Image (cartoon, grey):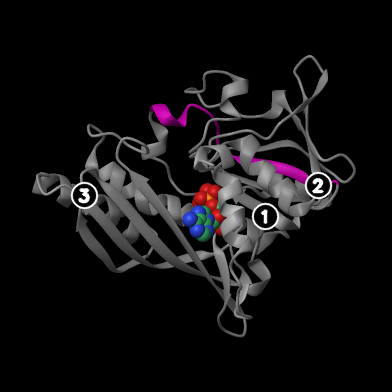
Amino acid sequence: MKLKDLGEFNFINRIGRKIKLSGRVIKGIGDDAAVLKYTRDKYLLFTTDMLIEGKHFNEDDKAGLVGAKSLSCNISDIAAMGGVPKFAVCSVGLPDSLDLKYADELYEGIKKIAQRFEVDLVGGDTVCSKKIVINIALIGEVEKENLTLRSGAKGNDIIFITGNIGGSIKFRHLNFTPRFKEARFLVKNFKINSMIDVSDGLLADLGHILKESNKGAAICEKTIPLSKYAAGFDSAVRDGEDFELVFTLSERYADRLENMWPFKTRLSKIGRILNGRKGFTLVRKSEKSERIKPAGFTHF
Ligand code: ADP
Ligand code: MG
């Protein structure tokens, strides 16, 4: 059997099934970051992401933006847990023929984001490779009461999304702001029942919330905010790398959240969590409902 026959998510589940964890792990594989025992009132968060030339960025993309993205996508995962990023290590594989200027700019990009989000870059590893590879691992922390998992969605919760989705690959995936301040506002002021950042596509990532929470959802086409780069609704909900937050909270608080929202970042109600029916029901602009699969980007 080949990896592509198994699929990325089945492969990851298979790794998870074979690992026995100690009692210090609150949540291992299966969320945006691992959650580990830490202090009396806080958990430690731990996440990593890898970018590969030709896959996540191309030779002619600006090195500074590639560096910025490599840290920003990790910060996005810590934000999706309700947490605060703290310490990063950065490993790079670089061709020995690479221009020093490129390598410098790459690190300038990482440093800019590190400074902006108060992350300390404390180490890494350097190897020679044919293609450029960047892997950052990031530690964060979160007050116990603010921890937000994928698994907490409740029946009748309202589903919200920040920003606009779709077509990110054309430009925005290298130049996005992780929704850190939005996430902290949410967890400090509301009981957010579940949250994820959109890296594989809205349907796939909301699908992770549904699976982990054992729920279904109804979403409305007309309320889903498309970016100007989106090629249309059906591809926008499957495109990856939006790095927006999708979250759910009790309908009792939904109006208050909309009234209190202090950011320029758009906030949209896109649907509702369902107790009974699993999977997605999509209400089209014509008001017709259809069942859809949570497909999105997978690596294989
Ligand atoms: P995200 O898009 O939020 O970064 P992923 O889809 O990459 O999340 O990963 C989902 C979960 O699977 C995470 O908990 C991640 O740590 C875990 N995971 C992914 N790849 C591996 C791997 N090779 N070994 C162990 N865990 C993995
Ligand atoms: Mg994520």
Name of the residue lying farthest toward the front: 1
Up/down of 10 relative to 15, above or below: above
Element on which disc 1 rests: helix
Q: CA distance from mark 3 to mark 2?
A: 44 Å
Q: Who is closer to the viewer here, 55 or 14?
A: 14
Residue beneath label 3, please? Answer: 129
Q: Say which of marks 3 and 1 sits in front.
A: 3
> Type of residue at label 2?
Lys
Locate residue 151 relative to residue 83 in the image: left or right. Answer: right
> Type of residue at label 1?
Arg
Residue beneath label 1, please? Answer: 150
**Which quarter of the image is occupied by the N terminus?**
top right
**Residues in magenta?**
156-170
The residue at 52%/18% (across/down) is 231
Q: Who is closer to the viewer here, 256 or 17?
A: 17
- Determine which quarter of the picture holds residue 7: top right
Do we see residue 102 in this rendering?
yes
The residue at 33%/43% (across/down) is 52
Could you tell which of marks 3 and 2 lies nearer the N-terminus? 3
Element on which disc 2 rests: loop
The number of numbered discs placed on residues in the rendered structure image is: 3
Element on which disc 3 rests: loop
> Type of residue at label 3?
Ser
Residue 111 pos. (x, y %): 27, 57
Q: CA distance from mark 3 to mark 1?
A: 36 Å
- Determine which quarter of the picture holds residue 48: bottom left
Residue 215 numbered mark, or none? 2
